[in-house]
Amino acid sequence: MSVIDLVPYDEALATYDPVMGFEVHIELGTATKMFCGCSTELGAEPNSQVCPICLGLPGSLPVVNAIGVESAIKIGLALNCEIAEWCRFARKNYFYPDIPKNFQTSQYDEPIAFNGYLDVTLEDGEVFRVQIERAHMEEDTGKSSHIGGATGRIHGASHSLLDYNRAGIPLIEIVTKPIEGAGSRAPEVAKAYVAELREVIKALGVSEARMDKGQMRCDVNLSLRPHGREQFGTRSETKNVNSLRSVERAARFEIRRHAAVLNDGGSIVQETRHFHEEDGSTTAGRIKDNAEDYRYFPEPDLVPVAPSREWVDELRAALPEMPRVRRDRLQAEWGISDQEMQSALNAGAIEPILDTITAGAPADQARKWWMGEIARRANESGSELGAQPITPAQVARVCALVAEGALNDKLARQVIEGVLDGEGDPDQVVAKRGLAVVSDDSALGTAVDEAIAANPGIADKIRDGKLAAAGALVGAVMKATRGQADAARVKELIMERLG
């Protein structure tokens, strides 16, 4: 179905209620794989980090990665889940070239963590609770590269290359319960959930959760049901969506697509779908299997996992400050309103601001530049704030130059602009553009005398005691010096000249 066939979003929501669910895969930052000692380091030669275990060769026996289990428990606790006293692995059987064993070692009906929730904050400050079904341990698959086609997918390719370095890397899959009641805000809830989950994972230190590197991947499940009906509709599953913006766009597109199919009297096919970044659309992948089609059965080569309650309590006590609690603390420390904090959160500015403060900038100045000039440039380019070509250390240096009196706000804005345009560090931009504040009395005195001579009426008002009029002369000097004059010193010189 092409984009022009889609039902308008508001029209779709006037007829149907969206129901969503998310399966998010987190690639753990362990040194070795989940069931063997092979390295997980990125960038190695293809098929150089493999062994009989992760290749599934006969006679090889897996051993569970203890750090992987610990990370899974931490994630479960952070998501307010119950931690199983006893759980085990299962074999998920299906044939695909990126699974050398022809089965994936995962968990099915006995996950390590279950029955939790995560509260997420929407752009207007509303809090929406997402219920967590489970978080379970499993291993990643290998990587297929399809060669010769126009799309990089298997259809149309002349041949495929397989790299098993990634096969066996530890994953935690976090599965939500069906998310109802979001209504027209469903795409926003989708984005906010994945964003908050990413912050939780990063806070725990179990993964960098870089979506652009595949360390965090989201499958977006969506179905529609007519208003007033309790039974869920047939769902589609958009696979491996790898950015927050794309999660939101995928949910929005699928709502419009489902509505178009249903309005035409058609039926939704339960299938996986591919997301296309260039236009935000999805296309059909394969018919989605049901759980029984995978022929799950307990993994006979691995003993059950039974974390002691003492260990779980130790891990619970050692959890770091969670992102929501941290944001509340920072808001109090910074002395800003709920709306200001929410704006910083929506812009993705919290971490850049904190890093800039760590680099030596005052909190108010760090917020000012990240939420001002830098955010404006990010919006213009349609990119994320953290992706801008300027570092917190560089922003802190601009703040220091302002504090030293070497720059004023107008000049500092130009320095920020120069750094963003690739002209070098702040000091290099100042030198190249000649942006330093002019505070030399001889240079300023000439400009002040010229401004007084050009505005005799204003000068007379100041002599008569109307000191507020000095602002006009200060403005004239600033204009003459291209904003580089020290405004405070200019005003002092005006007062000295006019008595």
Image (cartoon, grey):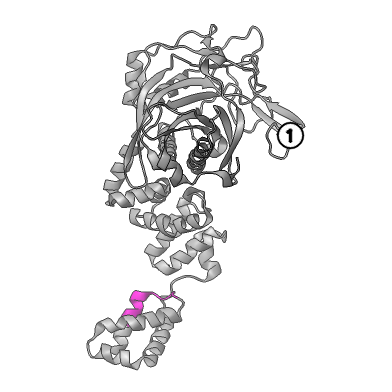
Examine the rendering and report whether any part of residue 216 can be seen: yes
| Residue 63 sits above or below residue 463 on the image | above
- The magenta-colored residue range is 483-493
Q: Amino acid at mark 1?
A: Gly
Q: Is residue 46 left or right of residue 182?
A: right
| Residue 273 sits above or below residue 246 on the image | above
Question: Element type at marker 1?
Answer: loop
Q: Is residue 364 left or right of residue 48?
A: left
* Residue at point 45%, 79% (across, down): 481
User: Callout 1: 10 Å neighbours few (<14), some, many (20+)?
Assistant: few
Name the outermost residue toward the front.
265
* Residue at point 65%, 14% (across, down): 52
Residue 489 inside the magenta-drawn segment: yes
List x then y, in percent, for residue 363: 34, 53
List x then y, in percent, for residue 458: 31, 89
The residue lying toward the viewer, choosing from 269 and 97, is 269
* Residue at point 69%, 26% (across, down): 162
List x then y, in percent, for residue 61: 59, 9
Examine the rendering and report whether any part of residue 188 can be seen: no
* Residue at point 35%, 28% (across, down): 117
Q: Which residue is mark 1?
A: 156
